[in-house]
Amino acid sequence: TKCGLEKIEAVDKEFDPNFHEAVSQTPTDEKPENTIVSELQAGYKMGDVVLIGIASCYEVVIILLALNKIGVVSKWFDIRASEKDIQE
């Protein structure tokens, strides 16, 4: 997306606890062990940072602004967000 939000691919990928959250396991002989067979909610990341419960660029901007206001946002986010905002 324009704001750098990237969907994390899940279905048919090997489960990775750094990017995926398991709700249940489904035994099957059709796929290799630890393969994701369905997705309840899409996950997103911005760069290497996984964003939980984010579904739009608008939500990313709101969170970045809030974090920046309290001084929590890293320089990477400050630079990345300002570059993307200028281009839009």
Image: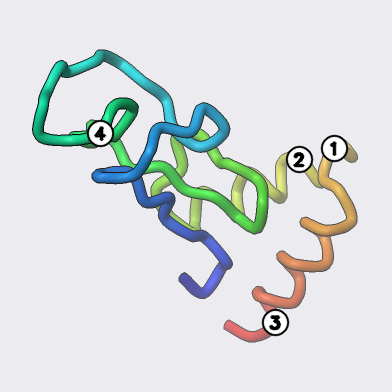
Q: Which badge, 1 or 2, comes first in the chain's sequence?
A: 2
Whether residue 26 sits left or right of residue 84 in the image: it is left
Q: Which badge, 3 or 4, comes first in the chain's sequence?
A: 4
Q: Which badge, 4 or 2, comes first in the chain's sequence?
A: 4
Q: Kindly indicate whether the residue at mark 4 contacts the one at mark 1 (C-beta within 8 angstroms).
A: no
24 or 87, which lies in front? 24
Which residue in the protein does label 2 denote? 67
Whether residue 1 sits left or right of residue 76 in the image: it is left
Query: Eyeballing the image, is 27 above or below 66?
Result: above
Q: Which badge, 3 or 2, comes first in the chain's sequence?
A: 2
Label 1 SS:
loop
Calculate the distance from the C-alpha at mark 1 to the C-alpha at mark 4: 40 Å
Mark 2, other Cα within 10 Å: few <14 / some 14–19 / many ≥20: some
Quadrant placement of the C terminus: bottom right
Mark 1, other Cα within 10 Å: few <14 / some 14–19 / many ≥20: few
Calculate the distance from the C-alpha at mark 3 to the C-alpha at mark 4: 45 Å
Calculate the distance from the C-alpha at mark 4 to the C-alpha at mark 2: 40 Å
Label 4 SS:
loop
Which residue in the protein does label 4 denote? 32
Q: Which mark is residue 86?
A: 3
Q: Kindly indicate whether the residue at mark 2 contacts the one at mark 3 (C-beta within 8 angstroms).
A: no
